[in-house]
Image (cartoon, rainbow, N blue to C red):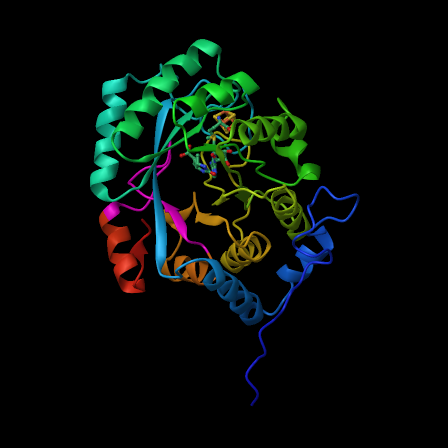
Amino acid sequence: MTIAQPVHIVPRAAASEPSGAQGAQRWPVAEIEALFALPLNDLIFRAQQVTREHFDPNEVQRSTLLSIKTGGCPEDCGYCPQSAHHDTGVEAGKLMDVESVRSAALAARAAGATRFCMGAAWRAPKDRDIEKVTELVKEVKSLGMEACCTLGMLTKPQAEALKDAGLDYYNHNLDTAPETYGRIISTRDYQDRLETLENVREAGMSVCCGGIVGMGESRRERAGLIAQLANLDPYPESVPINELVQVEGTPLHGTDKLDPLEFVRTIAVARITMPKAWVRLSAGRQQMPEAVQALCFLAGANSVFYGDKLFITGNPEVERDEKLFEKLGLRAAG
Ligand code: SAM
Ligand code: DTB
Ligand code: SF4
C-alpha cells in the first residue's frame, strides 16, 4: 500500500502574482471548487501541511465578543437576531458605557482571551458613535489586549479615527458569494462591504473578514465566498467561518442543516487558499460535536470565539472549551 503523496495544489497564477493582476485571479472559483471535491483525506492532509508551514498547529488564538450596542439594526440580514426587520425578541439597547466594557474585557482577559471584539448592531456608525467607541478601544488597549471592532460600514475618516485610537482589527464580513448576497440581505450590496474593507486596509488596520455557511447555499456558492476572500489583495489576516446559528423569527430559521463534513471542507479550503490567515472556527460551535470541532482544527482552524456567549447566541462555556483543548493538546496562542 503506497502512502498518499502530499497533494500539491498550486493556483494557476503563481501565489506571488497580485490578485489585482489583469484577469489572473490567484484562486479562480473553479480551482476552489476542485479543492472542495478532493477526497477528504487529501484535502485535510494538504490543509494541515499548509497550517504547519506557517503556524504552530497546536496553538489556538482566542477572541471574546461583546455586543456594545445591541438590537434595532436597520439592516435586514436574513441570519441576524439583531435586525429590526425580524421579530426575534432582541431588545434594542444603547451603547454601553466605558466601565461596563472595562469589566467585560477584564473578565475575558482573566479567562485567557488575547483579543476583545466589540460589536454594534449598526448599518454604519455616526461620527459621534465613533468618538465614543474610540474611548472603549483605548480602555481595552490599556488592559494589554488586542482590540477588534465590528460596527458596520465605515468612511475613511472613521477608519482612521479607530486606527488612531489603537484598534488592531476591524471585522467586516462578506458573508456569502456575490450571486447569493441579494437572497440574504437586501438593504446593502457587496460593493458597500468592499469599500469599507478598502477603508480599513488603507487606515492600516488588520482585516477580519469571513462569512457564514449553512444558509442553504450550494457548494459552488461556498467556493464563491472563499474566492472573494482569497482574492482580496492582501487576503484578510483573520477569516471567521461561521456556521449559521438558526434564530427563531429570522428568515433563515428552518434552513436545512449543513452536513458537518461540508463545514470541515470549508475550513480546509479557507486554510489552503489563505495560508497565513488566522482561520477562525466561529459561530455554530455550541451545537457542534467535539469530534467535528477536532476535524476543523485538523483542517487548519486555529482561532475561536471564547466565552459563554457570542453577541446574542450561545457559545461553549469556558470550562467546556478548556476540557476540549486539553483533550486535543491545544494551547492558547500568545
Ligand atoms: N453589524 C455589523 C455587521 O453586520 O457588519 C457587525 C455585527 S454582525 C452581527 C457580525 C457578523 O456576525 C455578521 O457579519 C455575520 O457573519 C455574523 N452573524 C450574525 N448573525 C449570525 C448567525 N445567526 N449565525 C452565524 N453568524 C452570524
Ligand atoms: C464573525 O464572523 N462572527 C462573530 C464576529 N465575527 C463578530 C459574530 C457572530 C454572531 C452570531 C450571532 C449572534 O450571537 O448575534
Ligand atoms: Fe445589523 Fe450586522 Fe445584524 Fe446585519 S449582521 S442585521 S448589519 S447587526
Q: Residue furthest top?
A: 128
Q: Is residue 198 above or below residue 266?
A: above
Q: Residue furthest right?
A: 23
Q: Position of residue 333 (x, y in %)?
A: 33, 51
Residue under the image location 49 percent in, 62 percent down: 53
What quarter of the picture does the N terminus occupy?
bottom right
Magenta-colored segment: predominant secondary structure: loop
Q: Quadrant of residue 328?
A: bottom left
Q: Position of residue 200 (x, y in %)?
A: 53, 28
316 magenta-colored = yes
273 magenta-colored = no
Q: Magenta stretch?
A: 301-318
Q: Is residue 145 above or below residue 28?
A: above
Q: Is residue 48 above or below residue 332?
A: below
> Is any part of residue 155 visible from this angle?
no
Q: Position of residue 312 (x, y in %)?
A: 37, 31
> Is any part of residue 253 visible from this angle?
yes
Q: Nearer the viewer, residue 314 or 277?
A: 277
Q: Residue furthest bottom?
A: 1
Q: Quadrant of residue 19?
A: top right
Decide if residue 145 is on the left or right side of residue 127. Answer: left
Residue under the image location 63 percent in, 26 percent down: 195
